[in-house]
Image: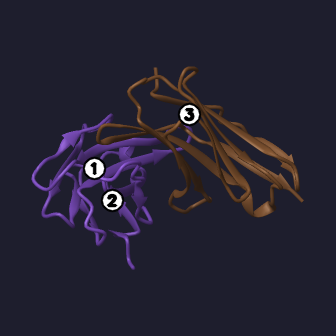
Amino acid sequence: QKEVEQNSGPLSVPEGAIASLNCTYSDRGSQSFFWYRQYSGKSPELIMFIYSNGDKEDGRFTAQLNKASQYVSLLIRDSQPSDSATYLCAGNTGNQFYFGTGTSLTVIP
Amino acid sequence: NAGVTQTPKFQVLKTGQSMTLQCAQDMNHNSMYWYRQDPGMGLRLIYYSASEGTTDKGEVPNGYNVSRLNKREFSLRLESAAPSQTSVYFCASSERDRGSAEAFFGQGTRLTVV
């Protein structure tokens, strides 16, 4: 069983809609969770991190963490074509980061 | 503000050849990592170094060796390249002493073994 699981998609949403990306994790010892965005041919870049139960908002992005359900999500409001990318969920346990396989998001103009 | 720098960016090797991928970070981070990324497989950890002088195996260490030369540099060596090692390799660093420290990535090395 992989440490972090994501639906690979692809996920398509129209411009202006809310995109919802989900992730589950298996290690209850995981302390923090990260959402990275990766454009094709580029390296991952951090969007948000969360380590407390509940919601964390940053501009158009909201990360949600539910430790009881071992569930992490990322909501992108007012989706833009520039949001089209692969989104990687990662958990951190000790010195290691565990990445999901990523969800491909396409925002249709 | 270079962050994490990897060299080379592209490389083609013949089966059986050896090479070293170089990685350096200027953020004074303690932890450094090597990942490989393959289609449909996500980022898989090859080796990591929690601090200068220590290295540990990750999920897919076979066929690789690493050296943490100093706090800044962490190299990945392929002793005898195989086609299965064709991948994109990312080096990353993180400051584990700080709460929710994210990993910062280099620009990647696209390696093809023929």
Q: Given the image, on which type of amino acid does mark 3 rest?
A: Asn
Q: Is residue B35 left or right of residue B49?
A: right
Q: Residue at x 46, y 26 (%)?
A: A2
Shown in brown, the chain is: A
Helix, strand or loop for disc 3? loop
B22 shown above or below B98: below
Chain letter of disc 3?
A: A
Residue under numbered circle 3: A53
Where in the figure is residue A109, as x and y percent of width and height?
90, 59
Residue A102 higher or lower than B68, as above or below: above
Q: Residue at x 79, y 51 (%)?
A: A77
Query: x and y percent of residue A73 in the render?
Result: 65, 37
Q: Which residue is mark 1?
A: B81
Q: Are tags 3 and 1 found on a single chain?
A: no
Query: B106 or A27: which is nearer to us?
Result: A27
Q: Which chain is purple?
A: B
Sooner in the amino-acid sequence: mark 2 or mark 1: 2
The reply to whether residue B79 is in sight is no
Q: Nearer the viewer, mark 3 or mark 1?
A: 3
User: What's the mark number on residue B13?
Assistant: 2
